[in-house]
């Protein structure tokens, strides 16, 4: 039994499940509920971002998922053998891997913007000034867009990788 390969696969699959599940839950349920809750929702997000390790754990899990994915890809491809990479499985894993890597970068931008928004909200002593309101709105829009992009990329990654070993051409 190849314990190294088994460990890589377990870490990659469990990490990917946590990362994608977190992204889908935030985009589909948490963010809309926060918007509907108004100022109380903003307080919840401040607490989630600044008061817990959610952002750190999610970022670390995403990074570990990509790292183990790269190691698995290297191993499956025989050191980036183009003959394997041009097979159906190779093409699908390449597409899934690229989507996952791009999702990692989009997710890191989410983390930075979330911290910025949470810190800005925490610093308010009352209603935001017009400049602060504009900045808050811009950050919220950016986060919404980045969240949607990340969730879509992770969905593509999951679908493509789940079906990769059954694609032949």
Image (tube, helix red, strand yellow):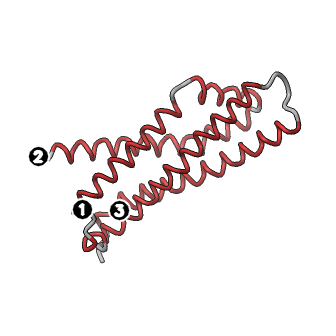
- Rendering quarter of residue 165: bottom left
Q: Earlier in the sequence, mark 1 or mark 2?
A: 2
How far apart are the two marked residues, 3 and 2, measured between alpha carbons?
23 Å
Question: Does dot 1 land on a helix, a strand or a loop?
Answer: loop
Residue shown at 50% from the left, 40% from the top: 22
Report the Cα–Cα distance between label 1 and label 2. Answer: 21 Å
Residue pointed to by mark 1: 79
**Image side of residue 124 versus residue 59, left or right:** right
Q: Secondary structure beneath disc 2?
A: loop
Q: Are marks 3 and 2 in contact (CB under 8 Å)?
A: no
Mark number displayed over residue 1:
2
Q: Residues within 10 Å of mark 2 (few under 14, many from 20)?
A: few
At x 29%, y 66%, the residue is 166
Element type at mark 3: helix
Q: List x then y, in percent, for residue 5.
A: 21, 48
Q: Which one is earlier in the sequence, the residue at label 1 or at label 3?
A: 1
Question: For mark 3, does the 10 Å Cα neighbourhood hold few (<14), some (14 to 19), or many (20 or more) residues?
Answer: many
Considering the image in quadrants, where does the C terminus appear?
bottom left
- Residue at the spot x=54%, y=56% of the render? 152
Q: Are marks 1 and 2 in contact (CB under 8 Å)?
A: no
Vertically, is 111 above or below 87?
A: above
Residue 3 % position (x, y): 16, 43
The answer to whether 109 appears left or right of 56 in the picture is: right
25 sits to left or right of 145? left
Please indicate whether residue 90 sits to the left or right of residue 112 in the image.
left
Task: Choose mark 1 or mark 3, whichever is in front.
Answer: 1
Q: Residue furthest right?
A: 130
Residue annotated with mark 3 = 93
Which of the two discs, 3 and 2, labels the residue nearer the N terminus? 2
Circle 1 or circle 2, nearest the eye: 1
| Residue 51 place in picture, x, y as percent | 58, 23
Image height of 117 relative to 168, above or below: above
């Amino acid at each position: 039994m190849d314990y190294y390969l088994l460990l890589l696969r377990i870490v990659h699959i469990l990490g990917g499940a946590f990362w994608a599940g977190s992204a889908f839950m935030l985009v589909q349920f948490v963010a809309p509920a926060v918007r509907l809750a108004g100022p109380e929702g903003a307080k919840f997000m401040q607490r989630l971002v600044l008061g817990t390790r959610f952002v750190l754990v999610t970022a670390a899990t995403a990074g570990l998922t990509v790292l183990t994915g790269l190691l698995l890809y290297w191993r499956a491809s025989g050191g980036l053998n183009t003959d394997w990479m041009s097979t159906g499985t190779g093409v699908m894993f390449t597409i899934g891997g690229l989507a996952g890597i791009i999702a990692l970068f989009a997710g890191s931008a989410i983390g930075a913007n979330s911290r910025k928004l949470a810190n800005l909200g925490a610093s308010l002593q009352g209603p935001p000034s017009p400049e602060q309101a504009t900045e808050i709105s811009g950050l919220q829009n950016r986060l919404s867009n980045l969240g949607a992009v990340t969730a879509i990329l992770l969905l593509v990654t999951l679908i493509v990788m789940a079906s990769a070993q059954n694609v032949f051409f």
